[in-house]
Amino acid sequence: ASSTSTTLALARNSRDTPEIAKTLAIGIVIANTVMIGRVAVIILAINRELFFEILAPMVIMAVPTTLFLIWKFFLQKAERDEVDLPRLHNPLSMKLAIKFALLYGVIVFLIKAVSEWGDGSGFYPIAFLSGLTDMDAIALSLANTESLALDLAAGGILIGAIANSIFKTGLGVWLGHKHLGKPLLWGMIPMILAGTAGFLLIELT
């Protein structure tokens, strides 16, 4: 399932099983780390030049959560608890596919409008808003856009990933049990800061 759906499900599950809230927080961090890799694979399949442009910044963004997870799994004594799997929706349902297609169309239109009709100043705000709830749509649209420079497209994807991470962190803290918040913030804030550093790397090079 999508990382947003996983975040939502695990946050809600933490209210029913607060005794494993810390473990569920780690699950959310895992889902968001996988999201970075998934976006990278999507870009590689469509636009290899853009992939190599964005590879280093995305690796930078993934490093903190990867180290956090290694620390949790291998350097700490893991607590083994049994819990029922949270109920997740089918990520390939027709309803979700239609929503994705509509969102993709809106993003493509907005990016086209900003890049060709305006002065380009609204591109990053659009990328931020587009990435809040879904990363696949903006990654696909920017990977398929030939009118944008590689560094601008890469920066837009990074901005979207940062926005997406901020949104899901807030969602988890808001909807989850209080014991979920602290470990979730410990895992996600460094990733957001590293993503910002990756974005600055694109802008400065």
Image (spheres, rainbow, N blue to C red):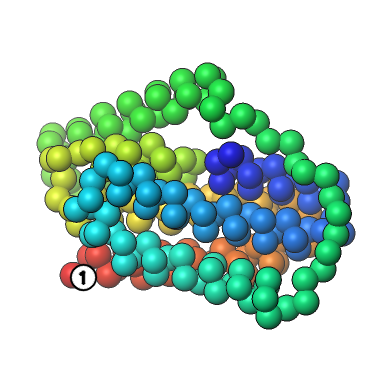
Residue 82 can be seen, yes or no: yes
**Residue furthest bottom in the image:** 75
Identify whether 23 is placed above or below 41. below
The part of the image, by quadrant, that contains residue 111 is top left
Q: Is residue 107 left or right of residue 66?
A: left
Residue 9 placement (x, y as % from top left):
70, 42
Q: Is residue 35 left or right of residue 52?
A: right
Residue 10 placement (x, y as % from top left):
71, 48
Crowding at dot 1, Cα within 10 Å, few <14 / some 14-19 / many 20+, comes out as: few
Identify whether 204 is placed above or below 1. below
Identify whether 125 is placed above or below 202. above
The part of the image, by quadrant, that contains residue 72 is bottom right
Indicate the amino acid at tag 1. Answer: Leu
Quadrant where the image shows the N terminus: top right
Residue 186 placement (x, y as % from top left):
62, 70
Q: Which residue is mark 1?
A: 204
Q: Is residue 15 left or right of residue 66?
A: right
**Foreground pick, 60 / 116:** 60
